[in-house]
Image (tube, rainbow, N blue to C red):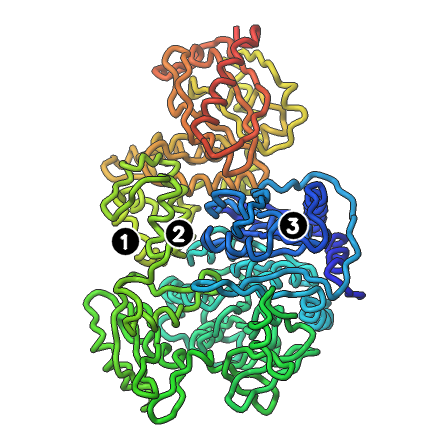
C-alpha cells in the first residue's frame, strides 16, 4: 500500500468497517465505528478551517484518553495542522508554557483537566486563542475530505518530553518519521493477519497516555491494520482493569510496567495458583491449564501484555510468562517516533527488548550508550538548535541509555546513562538492579536508588517508602545479603510521603529530584510541586478558593452525595487504587480520604451478579416476559386501570435508549407505563426499584427467615416480570448502580426512574432528586418526562388491593442533558412533568 503521508493511512482508516473506538467513563461504555471516527475527524478539520487555522499552524491537545482525542488527531492531520499533545495530568502552568513556545492557535481540553484560566498563550504577547472542550466534538456533522498539499517532510506533531524545572523541549516529528515506524510493523502484521482471523476482532485495552508516542501508535495506528478495536477507560485500578478485560473480551493490554506490577499483586491474591511464586515449567498450554484460575479472572480471550514507556523488571515478566500469558516489550523514545526495537510476539526473548525494526540502525558506543540512526529519528527539538546539536553524534541519535547487543542482534537495556552510579572502585551500578532486590524485601512498598557524592566517585544510597514497623536498617541489611559487592547499599533514608514522585505518563520514578532531596539540596518533605497533595488539588475543583487541610471535613465543603461519587471516581483514577464505596461513604475529613487513597484496594472482584439481576436480561428471561407481559401483566393492569394516554406521538421519532422520568403514585405505576408505551419501548425497559424495599434480601441481619425468603422472592419476581433493578435511596452503592444502568443502556434498554424517591399520598408531586440529572448526564441519555395521574386512586400506597379507576399517562418532549448542575437538570425535568397537567383529557 502507498504510504507517503499519514493522510494515506487516514484514507484507509475511513474505508475500514467495524468498531474502532470504545470508551468506558466508569458509568457507561460507548463505541464508535471507523466510519464515525473518520466523519468526526473531517468535521473537526472543517472547524479548524472555519477558525482560519491552516496548514503549519499549531494546536495544543490537553486531554485524557478518549475517542475524541483520536478524532481530533486525525482532523489535525487531514487539515495539515500540527498537533501538540500534552499529558492530561500536566499542570496548567506547564500547558501555558507550551502554548507560548509553539504559539498555539487553539487548545483542546478534556473533561478531566482543570482547564486554562484564560485564553492567553503564555508568552506575554497579548495574543488569544480559543479553548475548546474536546468532548463537544461533533460526531454527526458531514464534511468533505478536503486537505492541503501535505508532504512527507512536513511536521505532523510536536511532543514535549520534559520541563519540570526548565523550558520543555519539543520533539519535532514529521509524517516520514512516523511512517518509518508504521510501515515495517504493517508489513509484519500482513504476514500473519490471515491466521488471526478466527480470533478477530482483536480488542486492545490501551492504558498508555495518547500524549505518549507508543500509546498513540498502539491506539491510533496499529488497530486499523488488523483491523481491531481500541478501548479506553477512565479508571486504572486493578479491579476495574481486570473487570474491563473480562467483560469486553479484550485480547491485548497496552500499559506501562507499573500497571503489570499492580495487577500482579492483585492476581496473586485473587488466584491461589498464582501465589506466591507460580511455576513456569512446561509448555505454555500446560502453564495455562495449571493457572486457569488466573485466566478465568481475565477471560478466555485475553492472552497478551504489550509493555512500553519504562523498563520491565525481568522477574515481573517471568511472573506473567509462568501463568501462560505472553509479554511483549520493546524499546524506544519520543525522538524515534517511538520504536527502536521490538520483540516479535512469536519469538520473544526474556529480558531483551527485541531487535531493531526494519530500516533502523542501532549500535553501542564505546561507553555503552545506545546510538540510533534511521528515517524515524526526529528532525530536532522545536526552536532549540543547541539542544538538537547535543542530541546527535556524527548523525547518530544519542539515546542516553546504556545497553548491549547479543550475537543474534537482540538489544538489552541496562539503565539510564545519567543515573548510572560509578563507585570508588570504578565499577558501574545501575539503580534498577538494586531496586529490584529492595522491592522484594518485606515491608518495602517503594524504593529509589541514587548515587550520593563520595569524593570523586559515588556510593549507593536507597530512598525507601516503608510499611509501619519496618526500619531502613533492617531493609538494608537484608538487601545487602543478596547484592554484589559493588551494589551494596551504603546509606538509606525514608521518604516522608506515601508515594515516591513519578512521571505522570509512564510512572517512572523521578530519580533526579529524589537524589537532590537525599543530598539535602531540596527542603525536607515531599518534592514541592502542585502534586505534593494531589488529593487537595482534586478537592479544590469542588471548593474553589477554599483553604483545604487534613482536618477539613467534607461537610465543610458542602459536597453533595453525587459530588462524592464523582470525587471517588477521580481519586481512584488519580491514585490508581480501588476504594470501597462503603468506606468512602464513612469518610469525614481529607485525612480519611488520604488514608483510603494510600491503602491498596480490595483484591476480591466484586461480583455484580450477586447485587444486580444480570440474569433478567438472559434469553430465557426475555422469552418469559414476551409471554408474561401481554398474557398476564397487561390484562390485569387494564382490568383495574382504564388508561387515557396523551403525547404518545412524541415518542415516534425517538430512538432508544432513553430515561423515562415519572412522578410516583403507586405500585401500579410500572405496569401502567408498560401498557401505555409502544411495544418497541415496552420490550426494552428496565425500571429502577427502591433497594430499601427489599432490605431483608440485601441486608438480612435482623430479619426473620420468613422475611428474608419473602423479600428475596419478591425481588426475583420483580426482576423477572419487569426487568427491574435495585436503586439505593440511601447509603452506598449509587456508583455501582450507575455502572449497571450504563450496561443496560449499552444493551439498548431504556430506564424508568421515579425521581421523587417516594410515592404520593394524595396526588401531589414531590421535589425531584438530583440523581436523575446525574444519570442522564453520565449515561448521555435524553430524559422523557412522564406525568401519571389517578394511579393512587386505583392502588393507594396504604391499600393492599386495587380498585377500578381511570389513570392518565402523558409523555412530554425529550430533554437533552446539559452541563453538570444535576440539581438544576432535575428541577427542569420536574417542571416539565408538572406542565403536562395541561394535557387535559388524558389526566382528567
Q: Is residue 440 visible?
A: yes
Q: Secondary structure at mark 1?
A: helix
For marks 1 and 3 on the same chain, the one whose residue lies earlier in the sequence: 3
Q: Residue furthest left?
A: 469
Disc assigned to residue 572: 2
Disc assigned to residue 732: none
Q: Position of residue 814 (x, y in %)?
A: 58, 25
Disc assigned to residue 71: 3
Nearer to me, 664 or 212? 212
Residue 547 sits above or below residue 285 on the image? above
The residue under label 1 is: 595
Q: Nearer the viewer, mark 2 or mark 3?
A: 3
Nearer to me, 56 or 491? 56
Q: Secondary structure at mark 2?
A: helix
Residue 47 sits above or below residue 204 on the image? above
Q: Is residue 604 visible?
A: no
Nearer to me, 142 or 281? 142
Q: CA distance from mark 2 to mark 3?
A: 27 Å
Residue for point 34% across, 76% down: 449
Residue for point 26% across, 47% down: 549
Residue for point 43% across, 20% down: 664
Q: How packed is label 1: few (under 14 Cα within 10 Å), some, or many (20 or more)?
A: few
Amino acid at each position: 500500500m502507498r504510504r507517503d503521508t499519514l493522510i494515506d493511512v487516514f484514507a484507509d482508516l475511513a474505508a475500514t468497517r467495524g468498531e474502532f473506538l470504545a470508551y468506558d467513563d466508569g458509568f457507561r461504555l460507548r463505541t464508535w465505528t471507523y466510519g464515525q471516527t473518520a466523519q468526526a475527524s473531517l468535521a473537526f478539520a472543517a472547524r479548524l478551517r472555519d477558525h482560519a487555522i491552516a496548514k503549519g499552524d499549531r494546536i495544543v491537545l490537553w486531554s485524557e484518553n478518549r475517542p475524541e482525542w483520536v478524532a481530533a488527531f486525525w482532523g489535525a492531520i487531514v487539515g495539515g495542522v500540527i498537533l501538540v499533545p500534552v499529558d492530561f495530568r500536566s499542570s496548567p502552568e506547564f500547558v501555558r508554557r507550551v502554548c507560548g513556545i509553539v504559539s498555539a492557535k487553539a487548545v483542546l481540553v478534556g473533561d478531566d483537566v482543570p482547564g486554562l484560566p484564560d485564553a492567553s498563550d503564555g508568552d506575554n504577547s497579548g495574543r488569544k486563542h480559543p479553548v475548546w472542550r474536546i468532548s463537544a466534538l461533533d460526531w454527526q456533522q458531514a464534511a468533505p475530505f478536503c486537505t492541503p498539499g501535505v508532504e512527507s517532510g512536513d511536521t505532523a506533531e510536536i511532543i514535549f518530553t520534559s520541563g519540570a524545572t526548565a523550558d520543555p523541549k519539543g520533539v519535532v516529528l514529521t509524517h516520514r518519521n512516523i511512517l518509518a515506524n508504521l510501515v515495517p510493523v504493517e508489513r509484519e502484521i500482513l504476514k500473519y493477519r490471515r491466521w488471526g482471523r478466527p480470533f478477530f476482532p482483536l480488542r486492545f485495552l490501551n492504558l498508555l497516555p495518547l500524549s505518549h508516542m507508543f500509546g498513540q501508535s498502539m491506539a491510533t495506528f496499529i488497530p486499523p491494520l488488523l483491523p481491531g478495536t481500541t478501548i479506553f477507560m477512565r479508571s486504572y485500578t486493578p479491579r476495574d482493569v481486570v473487570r474491563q478485560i473480562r467483560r469486553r473480551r479484550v485480547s491485548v493490554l497496552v500499559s506501562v510496567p507499573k500497571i503489570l506490577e499492580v495487577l500482579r499483586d492483585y492476581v496473586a491474591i485473587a488466584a491461589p495458583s498464582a501465589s506466591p511464586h507460580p511455576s513456569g515449567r512446561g509448555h505454555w498450554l500446560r502453564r495455562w491449564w495449571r493457572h486457569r484460575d488466573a485466566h478465568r479472572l481475565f477471560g478466555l480471550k485475553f492472552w497478551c501484555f504489550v509493555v512500553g514507556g519504562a523498563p520491565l523488571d525481568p522477574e515481573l515478566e517471568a511472573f506473567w510468562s509462568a501463568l501462560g500469558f505472553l509479554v511483549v516489550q520493546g524499546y524506544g523514545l519520543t525522538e524515534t517516533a517511538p520504536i527502536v526495537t521490538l520483540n516479535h510476539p512469536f519469538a520473544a526473548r526474556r529480558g531483551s527488548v527485541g531487535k531493531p525494526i526494519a530500516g533502523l540502525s542501532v549500535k553501542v558506543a564505546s561507553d555503552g550508550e545506545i546510538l540510533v540512526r534511521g528515517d524515524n529519528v526526529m528532525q530536532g527539538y522545536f526552536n532549540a538548535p543547541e539542544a538538537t546539536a547535543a542530541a546527535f553524534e556524527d548523525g547518530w541519535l544519542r539515546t542516553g541509555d546504556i545497553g548491549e547487543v547479543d550475537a543474534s542482534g537482540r538489544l538489552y537495556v541496562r539503565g539510564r546513562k545519567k543515573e548510572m552510579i560509578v563507585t570508588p572502585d570504578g565499577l558501574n551500578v545501575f539503580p534498577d538492579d538494586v531496586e529490584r532486590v529492595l522491592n522484594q524485601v518485606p515491608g518495602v512498598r517503594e524504593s529509589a536508588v541514587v548515587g550520593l557524592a563520595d569524593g570523586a566517585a559515588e556510593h549507593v544510597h536507597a530512598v525507601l517508602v516503608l510499611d509501619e514497623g519496618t526500619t531502613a536498617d533492617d531493609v538494608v541489611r537484608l538487601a545487602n545479603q543478596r547484592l554484589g559487592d559493588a551494589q551494596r547499599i551504603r546509606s538509606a533514608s525514608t521518604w516522608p510521603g506515601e508515594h515516591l514522585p513519578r512521571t505522570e505518563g509512564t510512572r517512572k520514578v523521578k530519580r533526579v529530584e529524589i537524589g537532590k532531596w537525599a543530598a539535602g539540596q531540596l527542603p525536607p518533605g515531599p518534592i514541592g510541586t502542585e502534586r505534593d497533595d494531589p488529593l487537595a488539588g482534586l478537592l479544590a475543583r469542588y471548593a474553589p478558593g477554599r483553604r483545604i487541610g487534613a482536618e477539613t471535613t467534607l461537610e465543610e465543603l458542602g459536597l453533595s452525595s453525587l459530588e462524592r461519587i464523582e470525587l471517588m471516581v477521580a481519586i481512584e483514577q488519580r491514585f490508581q487504587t480501588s476504594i470501597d464505596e462503603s468506606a468512602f461513604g464513612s469518610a469525614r475529613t481529607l485525612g480519611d480520604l488520604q488514608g483510603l487513597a494510600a491503602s491498596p484496594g480490595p483484591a476480591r472482584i466484586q461480583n455484580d451478579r450477586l447485587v444486580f439481576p444480570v440474569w433478567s436480561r438472559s434469553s430465557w428471561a426475555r422469552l418469559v416476559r414476551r409471554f408474561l407481559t401481554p398474557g398476564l401483566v397487561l390484562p390485569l393492569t387494564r382490568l383495574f386501570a382504564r388508561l387515557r394516554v396523551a403525547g404518545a406521538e412524541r415518542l415516534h421519532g425517538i430512538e432508544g435508549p432513553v430515561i423515562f422520568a415519572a412522578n410516583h403514585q403507586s405500585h401500579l405505576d410500572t405496569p401502567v407505563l408498560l401498557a401505555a408505551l409502544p411495544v418497541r419501548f415496552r420490550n426494552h425497559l428496565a425500571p429502577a426499584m427502591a433497594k430499601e424495599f427489599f432490605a431483608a434480601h440485601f441486608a438480612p441481619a435482623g430479619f426473620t427467615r420468613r422475611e428474608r425468603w419473602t423479600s428475596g422472592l419478591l425481588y426475583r419476581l420483580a426482576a423477572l416480570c419487569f426487568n427491574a433493578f435495585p436503586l439505593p435511596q440511601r447509603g452506598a452503592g449509587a456508583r455501582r448502580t450507575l455502572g449497571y444502568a450504563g450496561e443496560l443502556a449499552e444493551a439498548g434498554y431504556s430506564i424508568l426512574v421515579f425521581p421523587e424517591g417516594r410515592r404520593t399520598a394524595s396526588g401531589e408531586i414531590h421535589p425531584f432528586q438530583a440523581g436523575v440529572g446525574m444519570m442522564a448526564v453520565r449515561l448521555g441519555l435524553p430524559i422523557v418526562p412522564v406525568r401519571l395521574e389517578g394511579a393512587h386512586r386505583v392502588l393507594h400506597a396504604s391499600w393492599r388491593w386495587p380498585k377500578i379507576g381511570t389513570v392518565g399517562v402523558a409523555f412530554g418532549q425529550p430533554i437533552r442533558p446539559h452541563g453538570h448542575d444535576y440539581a438544576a437538570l432535575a428541577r427542569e425535568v420536574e417542571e416539565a412533568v408538572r406542565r403536562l397537567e395541561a394535557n387535559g383529557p388524558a389526566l382528567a
